[in-house]
Amino acid sequence: MSMPFYVSPEQLMKDRADFARKGIARGRSVVAIQFRDGILFVSENPSQALHKVSEIYDRIAFAAVGRYNEFENLRIAGVRLADMRGYAYDRRDVTGRGLANAYAQTLGTIFSSGGEKPYEVELFVAEIGDSAAEDQLYRLTYDGQVADEHGFAVMGGAADTVAAHLQEHYTDGAPLEDALHVAVAALGHSDAGDRVIPTADLEVAVLDRRRTQPRKFVRLRAARLAEVLSDRGPEQAAAPAPEDALAGSGPRQSGQDDPKDPTDQVSGATPPLEDPVSGEPPVAPPLASPPTTQPSPGTQPIDPVQPGPAEPPAPQPPTP
């Protein structure tokens, strides 16, 4: 009987953390900024259907980076938890802190268990209050750690570069238009130079306390973004990212295939095991038709349409 290889707990946790960080860094960054009237979320997201920023409850929003199917499951679980708590108790009992703690327990349990891989996600859970001093912004990492952010926060992609740009240009208590300009400029900033992100590739949402409705979450559509960001230079779309080859993008692939990387999400020229959109298995090639045999000379071919020789009638019982 062979003995299993021993891996120290420190090395196991390090490998799982490296795996999760590598998957998160593949995606594009998400920026959360506190402005005068609420909290602003900005992300470069070419998809118009797969959102990174969503509403959880009346005053609570959710943003994520990483694997879409994993953070979408977390979002749905958060919506269900908030709805049940608000229905069983009171709508004021649903808080961003409670949702952040629930997410932290879930992510921490998944990360520390050896039965499944860690989630390749990072989350923002934000809640606005009646004043800017009561706003709350929590950042949750793949291992369940919770950080209480103030002012602004960045996760995913080149987060350090974007955060450094925000550190230089962020102004506390700025109006929405100024905060949006700063966030979009930070997302387009890189070590290679600045880039003007197209308006159609931006996903922008706001928790706005000025809204009279109980629900404070609102998305800024393309027309509104074009009006606010009309004073920028020529737009330049981003190069294809590995996350563009994930769910929802069809069979199109981007990036480089690295056979040595077990976490590589790009298959290159390798055909997928299943259709990436519908999830259906690949269609098998049609079977070859059997070869037709020629009748031997001197034999009459049989026409399957023409009836054959009539059979004799069955014997009938004698009549009395």
Image (cartoon, helix red, strand yellow):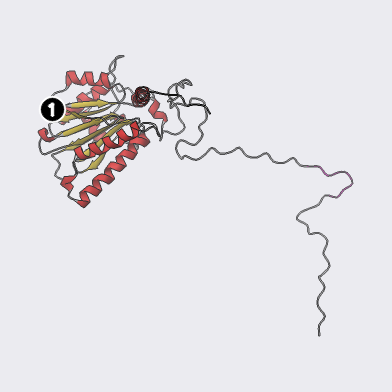
Q: Is residue 37 above or below residue 161?
A: below
Element type at mark 1:
loop
Determine whether 90 is above or below 70 in the image.
Answer: below
The residue labelled by disc 1 is 174
Image location (x, y in percent) of residue 295? 83, 44
Residue 299: within the magenta? yes
Q: Is residue 240 left or right of residue 198?
A: right
| Residue 231 part of the magenta-drawn span | no
* x 14%, y 44%: residue: 212
Residue at x-position 30% and y-position 37%: 106
Residue furthest to the front: 1
Q: Give the residue type at disc 1.
A: Ala
Residue, far bottom: 320
Q: Residue furthest top?
A: 192
Instruction: Give whichever of 40, 295 is nearer the camera.
Output: 40
From the viewer's side, name the closer residue of 4 and 109. 4
Q: Nearer the viewer, residue 35 or 123?
A: 123
With 154 as the anchor, is 316 left or right in this view? right
Q: Is residue 260 visible?
A: yes
Q: Provide the residue span drawn in magenta.
A: 293-300
Pick the quarter of the image with the C terminus: bottom right
Residue 132 placement, left or right of 52 = left
